[in-house]
Amino acid sequence: MTRSIRPLVVAGIALVSVLAACGADDESAEPSTAATTEPAPSATSTTSPPTTTPPPASLDVVTFNAGLARGFVDLAEERAPLVADAVAALDADVVAVQEVWEPRDVEALIAAAKDDFPEQWFLDPAPETAAGAACPEGELDALETCTRTACAGVAQDQLANCVLTSCGAEFGALSPTCQTCCAANIGASLDEIITTCEAAAQRYAYGGSFGIGLLSKHPIVSREAIVFESSLNRRAVLHAVLDIEKIGPVHVFATHLSPVFADVPYPGEGSWAAEQRAQIERLVALIAEKVPTGEPVVVLGDLNTGPAGPGFAAEVPENFALLPAAGLAVPYVDAAPDPACTFCAENPLVGGADDDVSVLIDHVLTRSLEATEVARVLDQPVTVGTGESRLSDHYGVAVTLAR
């Protein structure tokens, strides 16, 4: 864990003492004996008590991708209750979560966190299914044959990874509509995928869930959800205005942007990088449109893009550059003496791939607020079943902010 603290500035203490003594009318008079043993009754003091500048109002924020993506990230079922308890126990004012895709996981997180985070906001799913088969009869035959051979005996939550690794050519040969439907049914069995996609064209995974939520100890005085154009998974941003004592209104934007897949063909025209860039441009425009001049801004989320650093590679850096260019600070990178990856090769849920898999893509971005403390959080080992794992394939980022 990396940590950086800027101490509070404490004002100096001023002491001034003035004693007024009463003198005799006659300069030759003997001094009063009483005056030499105790203060004269008329003496007054102007000594001020020590004063200390009160600490500035602060706001503790956390972003965390919980990785509860059944069918894509290992052990989601077993990790779900651990994630709910860990998020609920965070010492934070505001927490943004991503990849809490399924209603049962949303409900469990709400139940675990309701006492500590009275304000909870999760965006409802928005499924989209078109009439007609996504995959005409016979189109899935080659993929089915390869999958039944290469992925026989593979656990259901590993099926997607196995297909992409072992049957990538067969998957790539599918039409965009058929590919999209297969990907949208991630977590289902091969038979369920075939049955569904030969009957209808389903566009988004997890029933059109956005997977994002916001937990707050402070009142949310206004809220608005803006849906982004996206493929395979629904993407959106939650814009919440929080009423923070001694700070005033703070605009929080919680989101999860599209990843730039290396092994999943982009459905239709365009590219994953272009889709992500369009989402960032829309986010920047929303901040300019929604936030009055001078009011604080906090952007939280897995942005699937980030800069290079010690031990981690850049991820779509040309897209990430749009955010600092829009006036958003990156305190975890700027303030930490040694920022660390948040999606890391050493994490057993990532799979221990090459070092260049390690990236910093989970972010707290700010404007008109100063970071006084930064840390990587929710990166501790946990026991899942009989083995050691992590809460998620991502680690969280925590930042303390002051005005």
Image (spheres, rainbow, N blue to C red):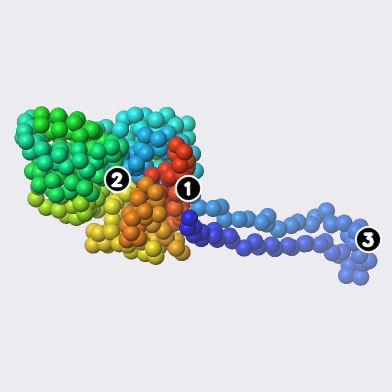
Q: Mark 1 packing: few (<14 Cα in 10 Å), some, or many (20+)?
A: few
> Mark number for residue 157?
none
* Residue 355 seen in the figure: yes
SS for tag 1? Answer: loop
The answer for how far apart the CA atoms under marks 1 and 2 are is 24 Å
Tell me the amino acid under the disc marked 3: Thr
Q: Which residue is mark 2?
A: 255
The image quadrant of residue 114 is top left
SS for tag 3? Answer: loop
Question: Cβ–Cβ below 8 Å for labels 2 and 3?
Answer: no
Residue located at (28% from left, 37% from top): 153
In the rendered image, the quadrant that contains the C terminus is bottom left
Q: Mark 3 packing: few (<14 Cα in 10 Å), some, or many (20+)?
A: few
SS for tag 2? Answer: strand
Which sits in the foreground, 19 or 337? 337
Which sits in the foreground, 149 or 355? 149
- Left/right of residue 15 with respect to residue 19 in the rendered view: left
> Mark number for residue 33?
3
Please name which of the two marks, 1 or 2, marks the residue nearer to the observer.
1
* Residue 239 seen in the figure: no
Considering only order in the chain, which callout, 3 or 2, is on the residue closer to the N terminus? 3
Residue located at (22% from left, 43% from top): 150
Residue 378 in percent (x, y) is at 45, 46
Q: Which residue is mark 1?
A: 380
